[in-house]
Amino acid sequence: MMIRDTSLCLELPALDRPSARSSLRARLVAGIAQLRQWYAVYRQRRDLLSLDDAMLKDIGISRADAIEEGRKPFWRP
């Protein structure tokens, strides 16, 4: 006779329930929004590095500050 210990089993949400589908959808939407935000930060930092000294002076940023900000990974604020 074999005894099964079901206490260690993970219960996955049944996707046929509306609440599980909406939860999954909400997570996907949030994940896509985060990816878009990271891509926007990446583009802005890349563009910052492409500005010349006159443009940086116009916005009040030194070249050293632009380089420091531009070299940050996209996921860091």
Image: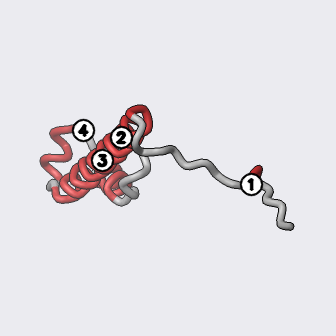
- Which residue bears the numbered disc 4? 60
Q: Amino acid at mark 2?
A: Ala
Given residues 26 and 46, the one toward you in this image is 26
Name the residue furthest front.
Answer: 1
- Which residue bears the numbered disc 1? 8
Asked whether the beta carbons under mark 4 and mark 3 sit within 8 Å of each other, the answer is: no
Given residues 44 and 66, the one toward you in this image is 44
Q: Quadrant of residue 67?
A: bottom left
Q: Residue at x 14, y 55 (%)?
A: 52
Q: Residue at x 37, y 35 (%)?
A: 22
Q: Quadrant of the C terminus?
A: top left
Report crowding for label 1: few under 14, some 14 to 19, many 20 or more residues within 10 A (C-alpha): few
Q: Residue at x 74, y 54 (%)?
A: 8
Counting residues from the N terminus, which is met first, the one under dot 4 or under dot 2? 2
Which type of secondary structure does the marked residue at label 1 adopt? helix
Asked whether the beta carbons under mark 3 and mark 2 sit within 8 Å of each other, the answer is: yes
